Amino acid sequence: MFTGIVQAKGRIAELQDIAMGKRLVVDRSTWKPANGYEPGQGESICCSGVCLTVIGQTETTLSFDVIAETLDKTKLGDLRAGDEINMEPAVFPNQPLGGHFMQGHVDEVGEIVDIQMSEEEVRVRVKPTEALMPYVVYKGSIALDGISLTIASVCLDTMTFEVALIPETLTVTTLGAAKIGDRLNLEADIISKTVVHNLNLAAKGQGKAGGVTLDMLKNAGGFTA
C-alpha cells in the first residue's frame, strides 16, 4: 500500500533481459528514505505507479524483476536506460497519509493531451480510455505515474480530466519534464472503484440491464463538462 507521495526520482541504470521479462536496475543514489528506512530484499517499492518487489540492492541501486504482463500493461515497457522513475516505499502505519491509498496496481496507460502553464501552477490534461471515466470524479483523487493528485476538472465531451501541479510536484517528480504525448500510468482511487463496483452489483440485483454508466454518474453529480 502506498500514498502517492513520491520521495525521490530514481534513474534506470540498466535493463536486463530475463526469462520472465526484464530486470530493472535503478540508481537510487539521490533517494534518502525518510526516518532512516532502508529498503531491503522482498520489500515493495512503488515505481512510477507500479508496485514492484526488491530482488537485490547495493548502496546505490535497487533491482526489480518485471514480468511481461506488467511491461505490456504499464509504461514500464517503454523504459530505457537513463529514464527517470518516481519512487515511494510502502506506507508505514505510523506515518502521515499525505496523499490517498494506492495499491500500485495500474488500471491503464493514459496520454497527456494538453499542458497549460501559469505563474502559479501547471495544468495537465490527460486522456484515459472511456472505461476509466466512471472512476474519475471532480475533486477526487487519481494517481499519475505513482503521484497522488486531485482531479481539477472533468470533461465528458472530450473524455479527459485535468490536474494542477504545484512547483514542489514539478521538482520532486518526473512530471516536471512532462510533455504533450507522454504516456502515464493511471490508477483510479480504490474508493471510487469500490463504489462503482457495488452500484453495478446492486443494479444487476434489481434486474436492470447494464450497470453504472457515465450518464448515470453525470446525472448524480460529481462531473463537470
Image (cartoon, rainbow, N blue to C red):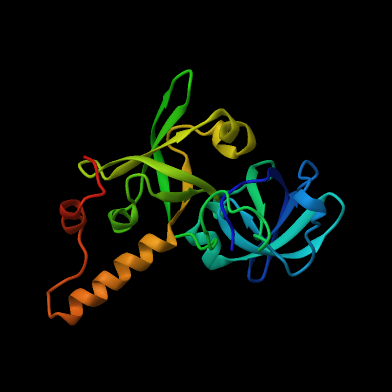
Q: Is residue 28 left or right of residue 165?
A: right
Q: Quadrant of residue 152?
A: top left
Q: Measured from the top left, where is residue 127 in percent x and y? A: 35, 44
Q: Measured from the top left, where is residue 72 in percent x and y? A: 50, 61
Q: How many numbered discs, if any? A: 0
Residue at 31 percent of width and 70 percent of height: 197
Residue at 51 percent of width and 63 percent of height: 105
Which residue is farthest top? 119
Nearer-the-camera pick, 15 or 164? 164
Residue at 30 percent of width and 65 percent of height: 196
Nearer-the-camera pick, 123 or 10? 123
183 over 210 or under it: above or below? above
Viewport quadrant of the N terminus: bottom right
Nearer-the-camera pick, 111 or 121? 121
Viewport quadrant of the C terminus: top left
Q: Quadrant of residue 156?
A: top left
Q: Measured from the top left, where is residue 112 in percent x and y? A: 41, 38
Which residue is farthest right? 59
200 over 170 or under it: above or below? below
Residue at 19 percent of width and 81 percent of height: 205
Nearer-the-camera pick, 63 or 203? 203
Which residue is farthest left? 208
Q: Is residue 143 left or right of residue 224?
A: right
